[in-house]
Image (tube, rainbow, N blue to C red):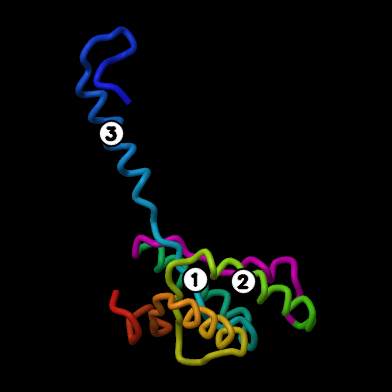
């Protein structure tokens, strides 16, 4: 990036605008893994997971919600496909900066995700089903 335009004239306004855009692009939003139940009340849990994702966005994060994505083409009631979905979710978890737990009911899949996050010394935050902070690292 140059202070001069393509004709060689000093152009500090364009330079400043481009510099600001570049700084904004470098400010990466953090990836957060949404840890919440799926099985049981599937319809209710899907609705809540969507709300948790929206909440994460309002907090300036990029939510990763594998149980919303993978259940679109994997069958949660098939043991092998469930295992595959969890493994793929853990691969995504490894790319995230934080794990956000929602609610106080932990499913088997959630326990696996939480253990993995803690083993990687990830920041873990806990929220109520109403998206209020209740524990873990401070927001």
In reply to whether residue 62 is colored magenta, the answer given is: yes
Residue position for label 2: 89
Quadrant housing the N terminus:
top left
The 10 Å Cα crowd at callout 1, few under 14, some 14 to 19, many 20 or more, is many
Q: Secondary structure at mark 1?
A: strand
First to last magenta residue range: 59-76
Horizontal relation, residue 110 to residue 39: left or right: left
The 10 Å Cα crowd at callout 3, few under 14, some 14 to 19, many 20 or more, is some
Q: Position of residue 31 (x, y in %)?
A: 45, 63
Quadrant housing the C terminus:
bottom left
Q: Nearer the viewer, residue 98 or 82?
A: 98
Q: Quadrant of residue 113?
A: bottom right
Residue name at image x 66 percent, y 76 percent:
86
Of callouts 1 and 3, the N-terminal one: 3
Kindly indicate whether the residue at mark 1 contacts the one at mark 2 (C-beta within 8 angstroms): yes
Residue name at image x 33 percent, y 38 percent:
22
Give the Cα distance between marks 3 and 2: 37 Å
Horizontal relation, residue 128 to residue 81: left or right: left
Give the Cα distance between marks 2 and 1: 9 Å
The 10 Å Cα crowd at callout 2, few under 14, some 14 to 19, many 20 or more, is many
Of callouts 2 and 1, the N-terminal one: 1
Residue position for label 3: 19
Q: Secondary structure at mark 3?
A: helix
Give the Cα distance between marks 1 and 3: 31 Å
Residue name at image x 53 percent, y 90 percent:
106
Residue position for label 1: 33
Q: Position of residue 17 (x, y in %)?
A: 26, 30
Q: Nearer the viewer, residue 65 or 47?
A: 65
């Amino acid at each position: 990036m140059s202070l001069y335009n393509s004709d060689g004239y000093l152009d500090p306004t364009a330079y400043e605008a481009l510099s600001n855009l570049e700084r904004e692009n470098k400010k990466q939003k953090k990836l957060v893994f949404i840890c919440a139940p799926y099985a049981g009340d599937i319809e209710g849990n899907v609705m809540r997971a969507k709300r948790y994702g929206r909440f994460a966005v309002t907090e300036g994060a990029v939510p990763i919600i594998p149980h919303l994505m993978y259940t679109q083409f994997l069958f949660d009631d098939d043991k092998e496909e469930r295992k595959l979905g969890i493994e793929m979710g853990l691969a995504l978890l490894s790319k995230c900066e934080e794990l956000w737990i929602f609610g106080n009911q932990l499913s088997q899949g959630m326990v696996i995700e939480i253990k993995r996050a803690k083993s990687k010394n990830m920041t873990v935050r806990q929220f109520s089903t109403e998206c209020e902070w209740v524990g873990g690292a401070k927001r």
